[in-house]
Each structure stands twice: as C-alpha cells, then as structure tokens.
Amino acid sequence: MVDWLSSNIANIIVIAVVAAAIAGAVIVIIKDKKAGKSSCGCNCSNCALAGKCHSVRDNKRQESN
C-alpha cells in the first residue's frame, strides 16, 4: 500500500486540488443562488431570456403581496 501511495502521490495531489476547486465553485454558486444573484453576473435587462429565468420567483412574490 505504501508503495502504491508513493508511486501515485503526484496524481493524488492533483486530484485533491481539482476536487477542492470544484467544491469551492459549487459553494460560491450556492451562496450566490441563495443571495438572489444572477448566475451570469450581468443585469437582466440585457439578457435575451430575462422574462424566463425570474418568472417563477417573481410570480410567487406577486401572489404573496
């Protein structure tokens, strides 16, 4: 087992770094989604799908008011 670990340490390190980067990206996406931020970072007025991505959330807000 130690021989296998020593011969594959570079691969293990690379996989760990990639996994950490993916986990970090997922965490940022989840935080942004909970904060109501847009996924593209632009404002919706310039988006071709502006009426589609927020229609469900906006309809729920209007019904509750």
Image: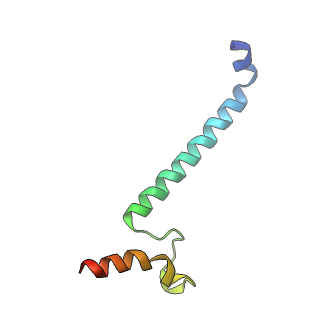
Question: Would you identify the image quadrant in which residue 35 lies?
Answer: bottom left
Counting from the top left corner in percent of width and height, residue 33 is at 43, 63
Return the residue found at the far top: 2
Where does the image place residue 18, in percent across and percent down from the top left?
Answer: 63, 43
Q: Looking at the image, is 37 positioned above or below residue 19?
A: below
Q: State which quadrant residue 62 falls in.
A: bottom left
Which residue appears at 73% of the width and 25% of the height?
8
Furthest toward the front, the residue is 63
The percent position of residue 60, horizontal first and vertical second, equals 33, 76
Work out which quarter of the rendered image holds the N terminus and state it.
top right
Q: Is residue 18 above or below residue 36?
A: above
Q: Residue at x 43, y 62 (%)?
A: 32
From the viewer's perspective, is 19 left or right of 1?
left
Residue furthest out toward the right = 7
> Split into 4 quadrants, where in the image is the C terminus?
bottom left
Task: Say left or right for 56 vs 48.
Answer: left
Q: Residue at x 70, y 25 (%)?
A: 9
Residue 62 is left or right of residue 25, and the answer is left
Tell me if 52 is positioned left or right of 16 in this view: left
Q: Position of residue 44 (x, y in %)?
A: 49, 81
